[in-house]
């Protein structure tokens, strides 16, 4: 016998008592989980974070469920709405080939939902299956019928009272042959479908196994997934006619006065008429005086310079106050009310930073980073210096009061009708703070939307989305070639992050004037608008985009000349060369199209010319929300939403497929053959079909997979084709 064999034989004797005790505990624990329940979906990071849906969505749940042997299993989905204590249940259906079980439920209210999965051995179903096999084989089944009688008696005891108990008790007697009935009668009763339903209702599972955790779903209102955003500065709302001179779309000269909320209110009907859903305002708070920035970001401001609105706070107040030049809080309330009348949401900028004049600087200097010389650390991004901005120290000793103050700012504006916040640079503040403050606000106002302005590395952007941000800016703004744009959008729409990350495709911002726009002229603006509006149900533009504002402060810079961040820019909204008609048309199509309101139905398809991007937005009643709505209330008409004049306009009534071809080259005509996914669309190779270009109004008869496209950027940026059967 070798030394190894000796060791193997003697090893169990060491610590035998303790080991046997541990083995018994392990065995008892294993017995509690005789059924394997795993790979439940949708699930994010082992349940650490919720996945996202919107009201009306049909949530489709899957789970792998199995056990040893050949017994049949049963399983159910448990779910509950926000505020509910009791679980609602629906049975899960079994896919034999993959040991995968499926169920679904509709989320019909905003807030945090919970769900999990349970499974158990279907003792009666297993008995009934085996009984049928023996009956079909003409075998004696007297013993099996007695076994069935015991099962039914157990269920009868569970039923307690009423008709169900009486029926089950009588059935048990029949199966046990206590009434001296013939075997065929007993078998017929054993295999009766009514008995199956009664047993399913009253049989007490003996090995009920629940998934190891409860999973969550954050359910938001519809504008969390579908909305057209428009950004503008109320302080520039002074009518252009009041400016000293008028340029091509905007005046770089000083207007006669500062714009007010009353002026901005007059612009709301125009914005609504263009089809936008959300109006986003940069900070509206008092602006610091010390180190105020001048025009074009100069360090020395002139007396008339208005400064950057992101330098928040002066003697008139801080984040809960309004810049006096804009008006009063009552003026703001009227502005919000008018927006609501027009079907518009107001989104406010939430920038957690302070000017040197902010009240917090005097009242709570410990909320900031103090340098060795006693001064407060201002913001820097070397070689850039932002002396007009003090970052907050979120991990200061008085952290609790600081965090509460930041939360109270949000609650203050919620009290004034705001339910959407665009959050400035969230990736420069602690993740723990955002998870806490979003939960705090949504506990009181579940319909609040948080939009992350996080132009940062992808993992950080995704992590912010997981912890609670409703939507996020994306890197779409800089992606202009097919090899860059296609994989990025496929990741957003089809990758794992689509469960929780909603990308809002802003075509430009006050900080971002890309080279593509600066050099591509009007065709580039039209192409980027078409891409943004059709690739994602969430998109936005910053005012001036529709006027083709494209002059950078210097070559190669993404900053605008005469940037509105540092000065007033009243505009002539009907200036020659504008693309207002494009904006209005695209927003109208989006409101009527189911396909363009969905996020995960985007697929790209081959274009034989890389300068033409070709993709499909799948429509049809297979989309989750439409399926759910039609199933719950098939008699209801299509959902309605107010149009620009407050009238009711159809929203989501068009279930068609859309094919989009975009010329990515703003300077040249491009031709190509595009490959239509006819199989996915249910079309035969030889079947003709009509495509209606909603941009030009033209109709084309296409056939089969390969079809010809010619795009002249001076005429149109592409085709937006509605497939008509």
Image (cartoon, helix red, strand yellow):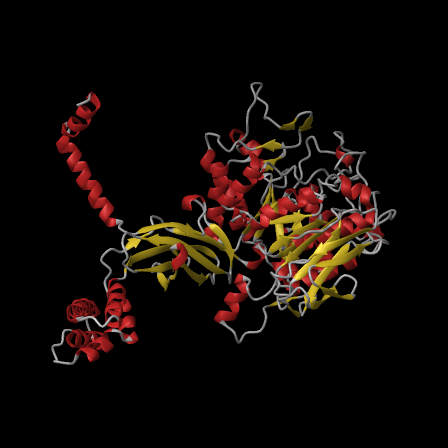
In this rendering, is residue 566 above or below 370?
A: below
* Nearest to the observer: residue 291 or residue 29: 29
* Residue 402, percent from left and from top: 49, 37
Rendered view: 707 above or below 569 = below
Identify the residue at horizontal 61%, vertical 31% (top origin): 390
Q: How many marks?
A: 0
Quadrant where the image shows the C terminus: bottom right
Horizontal side of 496 relative to 99 (left or right) equals right
Judge left or right: residue 687 versus residue 580.
left
Q: Is residue 64 above or below residue 187?
A: above
Against 196, residue 704 (above or below) is above
Residue 417 visible in the displayed image: no
Q: State the image quarter where residue 311 is shown.
A: top right
Q: Is residue 558 left or right of residue 20?
A: right
Q: Nearer the viewer, residue 507 or 274?
A: 507
Residue at 74 percent of width and 60 percent of height: 584
Residue at left 70%, top 53%?
Answer: 614
The image shows residue 677 at horizontal and vertical percentages of 64, 58
Image quadrant of residue 511?
top right
The residue lying furthest to the top in this view is 373
Depth order, front residue of 231/656: 656
Residue 383 in percent (x, y) is at 69, 25
Q: Nearer the viewer, residue 646 or 192?
A: 192
Looking at the picture, how far across and down is residue 724, in whole percent? 69, 68
- From where the camera sits, is residue 44 visible? yes
Q: Quadrant of the N terminus?
A: top left
């Amino acid at each position: 016998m070798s030394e190894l064999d000796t060791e193997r034989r003697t090893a169990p004797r060491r610590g035998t008592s303790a080991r046997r005790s541990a083995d018994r505990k392990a065995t008892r624990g294993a017995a509690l989980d005789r059924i394997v329940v795993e790979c439940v979906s949708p699930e994010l990071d082992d349940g650490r974070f919720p996945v996202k849906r919107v009201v009306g969505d049909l949530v489709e749940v899957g789970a792998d469920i199995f056990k040893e042997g050949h017994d049949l299993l049963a399983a159910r989905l448990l779910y509950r709405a926000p505020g509910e204590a009791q679980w609602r249940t629906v049975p899960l259906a079994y896919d034999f080939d993959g040991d995968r079980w499926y169920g679904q439920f509709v989320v019909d209210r905003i807030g945090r939902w919970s769900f999990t999965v349970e499974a158990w051995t279907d003792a009666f179903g297993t008995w009934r299956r085996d009984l049928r096999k023996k009956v079909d084989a003409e075998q004696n089944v007297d013993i099996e019928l007695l076994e069935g009688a015991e099962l039914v008696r157990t269920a009868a005891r569970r039923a307690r009272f009423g008709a169900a108990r009486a029926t089950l008790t009588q059935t048990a007697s029949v199966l046990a042959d206590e009434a001296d009935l013939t075997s065929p009668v007993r078998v017929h009763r054993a295999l009766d479908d009514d008995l199956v339903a009664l047993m399913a209702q009253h049989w007490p599972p003996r090995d009920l196994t629940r998934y190891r955790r409860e999973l969550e779903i954050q359910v938001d209102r519809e504008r969390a997934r579908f909305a057209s955003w428009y950004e503008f500065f109320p302080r520039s709302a002074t009518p252009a006619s009041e400016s000293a001179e008028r340029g091509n779309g905007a005046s770089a000269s000083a207007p006669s006065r500062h714009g007010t909320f009353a002026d901005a209110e007059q612009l709301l009907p125009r914005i609504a008429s263009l089809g936008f859903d959300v109006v986003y305002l940069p900070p509206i708070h008092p602006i610091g005086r010390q180190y105020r920035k001048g025009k074009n970001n100069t360090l020395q401001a002139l007396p008339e310079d208005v400064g950057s609105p992101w330098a928040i706070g002066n003697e008139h107040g801080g984040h809960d106050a309004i810049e006096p030049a804009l008006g009063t809080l009552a003026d703001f309330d009227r502005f919000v009310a008018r927006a609501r009348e027009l079907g518009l949401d107001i989104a406010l900028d939430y920038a957690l930073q302070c000017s040197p004049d902010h009240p917090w600087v005097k009242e709570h200097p410990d909320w900031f980073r103090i340098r060795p010389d006693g001064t407060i650390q201002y913001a820097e991004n070397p070689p850039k210096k932002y002396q007009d901005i003090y970052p907050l120290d979120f991990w200061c000793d008085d952290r609790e009061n600081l965090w509460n103050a930041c939360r109270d700012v949000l609650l203050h504006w919620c009290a004034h009708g705001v339910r959407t916040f665009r959050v400035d640079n969230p990736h420069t503040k602690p993740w723990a703070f955002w998870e806490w403050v979003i939960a705090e606000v949504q506990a009181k106002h579940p319909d609040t939307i948080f939009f992350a302005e996080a132009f940062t590395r992808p993992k950080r952007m995704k992590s912010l989305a997981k912890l609670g941000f409703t939507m996020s800016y994306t890197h779409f703004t800089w992606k202009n070639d097919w090899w860059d744009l296609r994989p990025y959008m496929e990741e957003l729409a089809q990758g794992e992050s689509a469960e929780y990350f909603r990308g809002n495709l802003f075509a430009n911002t006050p900080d971002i004037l890309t080279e593509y726009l600066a050099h591509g002229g009007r065709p580039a603006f039209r192409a980027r608008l078409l891409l943004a509006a059709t690739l994602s149900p969430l998109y936005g533009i910053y005012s001036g985009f529709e006027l083709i504002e494209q002059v950078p402060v210097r070559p190669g810079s993404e900053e605008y000349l005469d940037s509105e961040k540092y000065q007033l820019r009243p505009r002539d909204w009907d200036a020659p060369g504008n693309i207002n008609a494009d904006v209005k048309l695209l927003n109208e199509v989006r409101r009527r199209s189911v396909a363009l309101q969905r996020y995960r139905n985007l697929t790209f398809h081959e274009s034989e010319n890389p300068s033409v991007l070709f993709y499909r937005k799948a429509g049809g009643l297979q989309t989750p929300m439409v399926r759910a709505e039609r199933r719950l209330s098939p008699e209801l008409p299509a959902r309605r939403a107010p149009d620009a004049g407050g009238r009711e306009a159809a929203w989501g009534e068009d279930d068609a497929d859309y094919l989009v071809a975009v010329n990515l080259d703003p300077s040249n005509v491009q031709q190509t053959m595009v490959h239509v996914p006819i199989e996915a669309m249910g079309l035969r190779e030889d079947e003709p079909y009509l495509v209606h270009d909603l941009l030009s109004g033209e109709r084309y008869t296409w056939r089969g997979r390969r079809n010809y496209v010619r795009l002249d950027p001076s005429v149109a940026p592409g085709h937006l084709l509605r497939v008509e059967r």
